[in-house]
Every structure is written in structure tokens, then in C-alpha cells.
Amino acid sequence: MFTSTLSVYDRLVLKRPGLSLFLMLVFICAFATQLGKIKLDASADSLLLQGDPSLEFYREVSREYSSEDFLLITWQPQVGLLAPESLQPMGRMADELRLLPGVSSVVTVLDVPLLSSPPVTLGDITSGDSLPTLADPNTDRTLALRELTSSPIYAELLASRDAQVTAVQINLERNEQYNALLYQREDLRKQRDAQGLSSEEAKTLAEVEAAYKAGTALALEQQGALVDSVRKIATNYAQYADLFVGGLPMITADMVSFVRSDLNLFGGAILGIMVLVLAIIFRRVRWVVIPLTTCIGTIVVMLGILGALDWRMTVISSNFVAVLLIISLALAIHLIVRYRELHAQSPDGDLHERVLVTVKSMAIPCVFTGVTTIVAFMSLVVSGIQPVIDFGWMMTVGIVVALLLAFIIVPCMMLVWPVGRPFKHLGEHQPLTVHFARATDHHGGLILLVSSVLLLITIYGISRLEVENRFIDYFHESTEIYRGMELLDAKLGGTIPLDIVIAAPDFDAPLPGLALPDSGTVPLPVAEDDPFAEDDDFADDSFADDGLSDEWGDEGFGEGFSSGSQDSFKPSYWFSLEGMRELDAAHSYIDSLPETGKVLSLSTIFTVVKDLMGEDIGGVELALVEKSLPDSIKSMMVDPYFSKTREEARITVRVKETSKELRRDEFLKKTRAYLVDDLGFAPERVQFTGMLVLYNNVLQSLFRSQILTLGVVFLAILVMFVVLFRSFWLALIALAPNLLAAGLVLGVMGLVGIPLDIMTITIAAIVLGIGVDNCIHYVHRYLKEFPLDRDYKATMYRCHRSIGRALYYTTVTVVIGFSMLTLSNFNPSIYFGLLTVLAMAAAVIGALMLLPQLIIAFKPLGPEGGAEKE
């Protein structure tokens, strides 16, 4: 089979090198035309765990409460916070922001009504007179500052408690068309999974998915443009205050920007460094141009495939370009080193025959390394997180492309390039890899001892691994995004949203005093001095979905605000005394946690009403608040925190992303346990949702899936080793350095505090792919050399002089090139660079020192040397 395949390959490719290269050029250029279609997707949807019940509930909550995204600009003036020199330019900036497309409203301290500056009563509010604001020249600024820094609504939302910083909140318009496509897609998918779809419905689903995908790209582009516009406007006012832009849309836009910048800047820098290193190593132009051409061709073809298929890269899967570069370079170097060996042995031999023998000797190990590397990356496909799945599939397709191009471009360029003189290592210029062989020969026991110690350290380091994800850790401390998020968390209530949805108890009994068992509900009694009884407008503090609305007074406060209506009415549980007490207790506990920032709920409204009335409120007043508030007020004060149809209350929380104590999974479990065990909520009544929950689910799923899958992957690789090496014990020995290398990288992560998250979880698969390649090439060559004299140590020296050089050259080139990533401002790129360097070093040291020492120590080869017969 192999001989016949090689014969066809020789006839079609090697005997027509010029035509083969021309066709390759056309092939590469065709895919190059698709490069302009490449898209980078950093939408929240692309980073979530598909099929997660929490994701479905999150979308239900978003639909129920019509949640809006928002941006924040922190305003820290050099003068007093409410000084005219601060408020006037801030007001002008807010006016400019309101004109931006995609902005639904902008809220500042200038826009909100003041209820304690001086104090007003409910009667004052319902009288119809306008409430004071900071825009009024007669407003007492001292009282206003005290209210803004102590109000249960405004403090840590619009103003810091130390009166140093205020926030300008930019509420973004909901993309109803985009959301409609999302909901339609999810409904059809649920129907498909539950009962199947008709052909017409399946066609509709395909159309909706395509429209949603196109809408995602457009939405991200518009959001990125909006963030840029907001930043430009903020920059124009930097002379008046220190300003930072924050919010999840900004984090998304900046992640895309950093990844794109790193791809463009460091991609070129890495290639440049690789050219320099290859020139130093090989000292021949041809051995620089050939591998570089192969690498660039592979990357162009793979990126062209992504563009043609609209297969989008994410902040995670974008790493595939760098990893594919390593694999493509390794293939080219292995072919080149083998060719140079043959050329040195027979300088006057036939060129075609030399190239054919090169291909023949390297085909089996290279194909097996490709297949085993694919198996390693396929471990990512079961993760359930689309970017990680994409990374696995991209690497799978990319490795196939790399193999095809390497075995066409490299041999054909060898055939058409002038032969030149062979390069020989003279006795006084032994390759560096011989020193590894000598160390193994003379210090084999020490190598095993050090490996054992490293194994223990690795186990300890892995035990310290944390599954965590703090977005702020993705950015360098000197960057604007880091400093802005730090200020938001410290002064203005946190960054990452969390929703706690509490359902009312499941009971049918009417609320006491508000209904009769034999006559149903009855009209609510109205007190003589009840301020709600008048048919006047009502105004109060207002905010919407973890933020504020700027509609204060824009539409009036509604009409028909009468609690004396004779309409039958049954109040919600959450507007009863018992419901209020439950909600107050939950709100108070969550607000007391060090990880949480601003907390808002119906409890906040109840507190404001109590302050206005100057006394506790009873069940009747609570029912009146629910019944009598006009729709315009309900939409701002009640609807974001209460669902009548679902009979549930919603507590919105902003979690402090910069908190060093934040451990998402532990925090969520602790909070839920308190609500259930200490406050007595039935477990089924309490549900957590929001981006904090979804990202935590992603991390926990990634950890579980990778730990379970890695065991299966190692077993699969062991089986493939047995097939290739025809020896179970030799397969076990070859697997040992891979286990140690993969564990060592994970152990170092645990020791230095690099968490396993969506950006670093793929490193285990990368280490496996690199380590397996090295061991296959070394053992395959060892099996070829051993029958010559059946001397284990002599065979080791020959292997180190031949295949060892290929492993060493690849490692040195990649290590120096990828060290450039340490200059990035995006910490995941730095981690990726450092961990890749560590992985390459661990893999090559394992292959050149531990692996041969294990072979020498256990002598697993049979009477025929274990080599396959040709």
C-alpha cells in the first residue's frame, strides 16, 4: 500500500516539480482572494456553553425584562465634583453622546431628580410640581452632593461615596431585529431537539441561523464603532477630568482589538525572527526560503478556507494560526534535515532519488505525528464551547493542509533549486544535540531522579490549579481598560452583571385582609390621608436594568393614579409585608458581600418609599404602589425588578471584577447556600443568571471535559504508538515524556498562579500535539538505527546527530520567535507565548534526554530491534 502510494506520488508530483509548484501557487493564490472575508467574532454568544440550561434561562430573563447593554464613562474632575467647572463640560459631553447612533439614553447627575435636596414629601411629588435637579441654579449643591453619595439608588451607581468620581451612563438601544432572530433560532432548535422539524421548518432554521450569523457580524461592527466614537468624545474632554470608558461592550471591543493587533504585529515579528534563526542555523538561503514558503502557504490556505466558509475566528481560536505555524515549520525542518543528511552521505548522488528517499523515510513518522496531533486537538471538540470546538476543528483541518503542502512544496523546491554543496558537521563542530546524548550517557540516573522530582512538583502544581476567569487579568496594568475597570469596581459599583431571580412561594391562599374566601378579591381600603389617593402625578427615583433611565419628567408621571378604584385587584406576593421582608433580607445579605458592588431590586424602591414617608410601610401601601403607579413609572421603577406574569422578583448585582477574593464558583455556591439554608428560600425558588453565571459554567465545563478527555486522548495515542512501534512497552516509554511535559506545563501554571480559563485551557492539547510529534520522530528513527549494531547508546548518539537536530532546530526557532509575544499588552497572548515556549522546551528535553534514558534503562526492543519490515 505504502509503496504503491509512493509510486503514484512520485509520478504525479516529484517528476513534475515545476508544474506541481505552479499548481500550488494557483491553489494558494485562489485562497488568498478569500482573506478579506475573514471575521473575528468576540460576541458573548460565541463564548458561552451551548446547551447550558442556564443559557436558556438567561435568554428568558433577558426577554422578560428587556435588558439593555450600557457603557460607562467615569468622570473624575480636578475640581469639586459638583463645581460648575465640572458639571458644565460633563453636560456638553453628555449632549454629544446622545447624538450617537445606537444610544438610547445618557444619564448623568445633572438629569436625575433630587428628593433630599431639600427633602420632599410624597405630597410634593404628587402635586405636579417639577422636582429639583442639579440643572436648577437654586439647588443646594451641598445637600445634592450628600444625597448623591448616600442615596440607596445613586450612591456607587452615579457617584462614588467619597465624592471623587461620577459616572456618565450610556444606555444602548436594543437591537430588536437581532434579538428576534436569536429567539426564533432558539425556539426552532428546542423544537428540533424535542420533536424534530419538518422540511419547511428545517429550511427556516437554516435561514434564521444564516441571518443571525450575519446580524452578529454587523452588530459587533456597529458596537465596535460606537465604542470608538464614545472614546473619541471622551478624549475631547480629558482636559476637564480623568476619564475611563467601561462596560461589557467595551471589554468585547477591546478584546477584538488586542487580538487583531497581536495577529498583525506579532505575526509579522515572529516570521521575521524565524527567518533570522533559520538563517543562522542552516546558513543557506534555500533552507530559509523553503520552510518559510511552506509556512506562509499553509497559513494563507487555511485562512482562505475560513474566509470562504465564513468560519469565524474568536479570541480563543485565533491561536490556531500560531500553533499551525509551529507544526508546518516542524514538517519542513524534518524534511530538510533528512535531505541534508542524505546529501552529506552521497554528495554526487542523483537528486531525484535523494528527494524520493527523503520523502520515503519521513512520510510514515510525519503522517503519524499528524494523526496523533489531530487526536490531541480533537479533545477540544467535546468541550461544548464553540470557540474551543472551532479551535479543535481548525487545527484538524490545518494539520491536513500542512501535511499536503509540506510534502509538495518542500520536495519540489528541493528539485528545482540548484543543488549546491552539502553541509557537513566536522568533528570539531559537533551539533549541540550530541551534548544532550552525552548528558544522558553519563548522567542517566540523575535524569531519572530529576524527572521523578519534576513529577512530584507537577502533581503539587496541578493540585493548585484554579479554574477562574477575571477579564481584568487579560490586560496589562498600564492599559486604559485595566485602570478604568479598577476605578469602576473601586468607586462605582462593579463591572460584571449577576441576576438573582426569586419566585414567589407556591400557594393559593389569598393575602390576609385583602381578599375573602367566599367572595374573591375586594376593593382595597383607602386611608383619609393617603397621599396616593389623589389623582396626581407621582415621581420617584428611577433606574432601569442595572442602570438609570434619562426619562425623568420627559413624559410626565402618568394619569389616573387612584387607589380608590373599585376594580378588583389581588396584589403580588412581592408587594406584601412577607414578600418585602424576604426580599429585604436577601438584598441586604448580597449587598454585604465583599465581592459585590451595586445591588438593586424592589427592596431599593421600598427603602426610598419608607424614607419619603418617614415611617415603615404596610401591606396596603405596598399594594397601592403596585396597583397605582402609572405605566411610565412602573417601566422605570418596578418592571426591571418584578415580573407580574412570572410572579418573580429580580435582584440585579454588579460584581467586582478586580476583587482578588473573587472565586466565581465558590461565590455563587456560598450565596445560594445562604439564601436557601439561612433565609429559608426553597431551592426551586432561587435561580442565578447573568454573564457571571454563564462564564462560570463555561469554566467548570471546560475543566471537567478536558480532564476526562485527556485520559481518553492518552489512551488513543498509546494505541497508535503500539501500532506504529509494534511494541507495547516501547509505546508506554514513548508516552511517558508526553505525560510529564503536559503535566509540567499545567503544574507550572498552578505554581505561578496562571488560572485555567477559556484562554489557557487549550494549552494541554498544544503540549500533547508538540510532545507527541517529537517522540514519534525520535523513536521511529531509533528503530531504524538500532539494527545496525544493536547498541542502545551508540544508536542514541546517531539519533541525536540526525533526527535530534531537527527537533532542536524547530524548538530553537519557535522558542525565539514566540518569545516576542511577551511584549504584548494582552495577557492571554503573553501566557500563550510563555506556555508555548515552556511546552516546546519540555517536549524537546523529554524527547532528547528522558526518552532515550528510558529506552536504555528498560531495553524494550526485540531481537529485530522492533523496526518494521519494509
Image: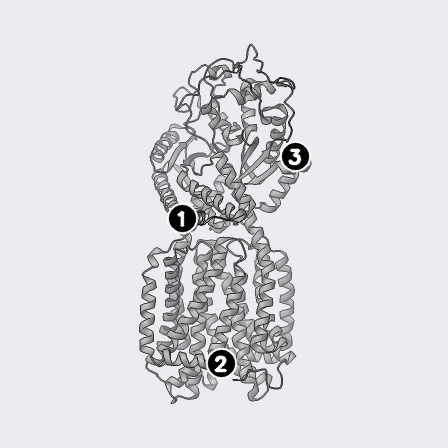
Figure check: 868 above or below 771? below
Marks 2 and 3, how far apart in space?
70 Å
Above or below for 239 versus 638: below
Q: Is label 2 in a helix, a strand or a loop? A: loop
Position of residue 567 measured from the top left corner of the image (x, y, whole percent): 53, 17
* First reached walking from the N terminus: tag 1 or tag 2: 1
N-terminal-most mark, 3 or 1: 1
- CB atoms of marks 2 and 3 within 8 Å: no
Q: Where is mark 2, residue-wise?
A: 802
- Which element type, helix, strand or loop, lies under badge 3? loop
Question: Is there any visible trace of residue 400 in the rendered image?
Answer: yes
The answer to whether 395 is drawn above or below residue 345 in the figure is above
Q: Which mark is residue 681?
A: 3
* Residue with the mark numbered 1: 207
- Picture coordinates of residue 522 (x, y %)? 59, 16
Percent across and percent down for residue 272 are 37, 66
Secondary structure at numbered mark 1:
helix
